[in-house]
Amino acid sequence: MSDTAASAASAASADAAELFAAAFAAAPSGLWSAPGRVNLIGEHTDYNDGFVLPFAIDHRTHAAVALRADARVRVASTFAEETVEVPLVELNDLFPSRRDEIVEWARYPLGIAWALLAHAEGIPAGADIAIASDVPVGAGLSSSAAIEGAVAMALNELWELGLSRRELAIAGRRAENDAVGAPTGIMDQMASMLGQSDAATFLDCRSLQTQSVPLGFAAAGLELLVMDTRVKHQHSTGGYGERRASCELGAATMGVSSLRDLVVDDLARAEDILDDVTFRRVRHVVTENERVLDTVEVLRARGPLAIGALLLDSHASMRDDFEISVPELDTAVATSMAAGAIGARMTGGGFGGAAIALVRHEDVTAVTEAVTVAFAEAGFAPPHIFAVHPSAGAGRVTSAH
Ligand code: GAF
């Protein structure tokens, strides 16, 4: 995967290098970066052993990193004033039980250092880490996986761990689950690690097998717009964990190890034996898995202009069955469609964040204006609407700046 290694220098890479110099009065030994992601389709299926179809985007987190002579790790970021310093040996005491002692933003880089320590022989050299990012935070574009991915790539190289991209993604999920305390699946870390330009990553979350699926947006005259509602969400609290618990209850009651093992034909029995809420959670996951498979097939056979109905069905399922949408997301989807989008849906874990719309080049301005006006009329905060492009996964930044 040649295009994952080279990532263009950007403002965030210069920021990370500058921050490193300011925070640690030295030069980093290298710069690594990892992208955020958009999930094209396949929501809340990853922790049910199901299918997802995300792609890495052209918004990245950069980490400037150097080893230290002692065994301490220091992290600085452009999101916070403070620098956090911890002896590496203490990370095992801090995570997971004493995570609250670490300021929230620092749990991501320190969490990945902790998860990777399990792969090191003894205690490795310490590290100074400076992080800058242009992945919007809280927008459902996985700014967290981008931090984990950039730091994981750096420490894997500097600590000579020799881990594969899949192993680094698994370490990222462990950081997210145990160091941050968010009960998320593996999708975001795999998307950030394995991204390729102009393609999505079709991931079977049970086997972790992947296939690259060409998207061909540009060739079809399409743009993929992100409509960030600015309604902030968090997956370490509340609804996300409740949805996951409902899925586990549904699987246990149906006598399967995960909802991946159910197909649409099982839904009649599910409706008989599950309570209404659990049934609708299960129906979302089962039908969403089908939609991912259908989307892959349609993209390959007919291209992106033909996937609009699948995106819309996915949104309706999340709104009505999984109940993770919010009025701002529904407005963005309905308005973009009325203004000419090919398809639209909320993306990511829900309860806020962003929706996406697949839009012909010539309709981008009309869609952007229509959604902005609809938000103003509804009394919502102004949305942030921008195009993203399927991009390379995590890697060392090779170009100088
Ligand atoms: C968040 C999680 F981090 C992912 O693992 C996934 O469950 C997603 O929500 C919903 O599809 O991004």
Image: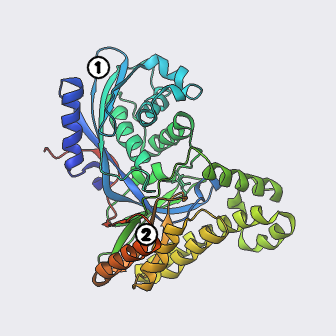
Above-or-below relation of 306 to 21: below
Tell me the kind of residue under disc 1: Arg
| Rendered position, 200 above or below 12 | below
Question: Local crowd at mark 2 within 10 Å, few (<14), some, or many (≥20)?
Answer: many
Q: Quadrant of residue 200?
A: bottom left
Residue at mark 1: 68
Residue 115 visible in the current orientation: yes
Residue at the extreme top: 70
The answer to which of marks 1 and 2 sits earlier in the sequence is: 1
Query: Closer to the camera, 345 or 209?
Result: 345
CA gap between label 1 and label 2 equals 42 Å
**Residue 230 shown left or right of residue 9 in the figure:** right
Q: Identity of the amino acid at label 2?
A: Ile
Between 313 and 350, the residue placed more toward the observer is: 350
- Residue drawn at point x = 18 percent, y = 29 percent: 21
Residue 362: x and y in percent read: 28, 84
Q: Horizontal and vertical percent for residue 133?
A: 30, 46
Q: Quadrant of the N terminus?
A: bottom left
Please give the residue where the numbered disc 2 appears in the rendered image. 356
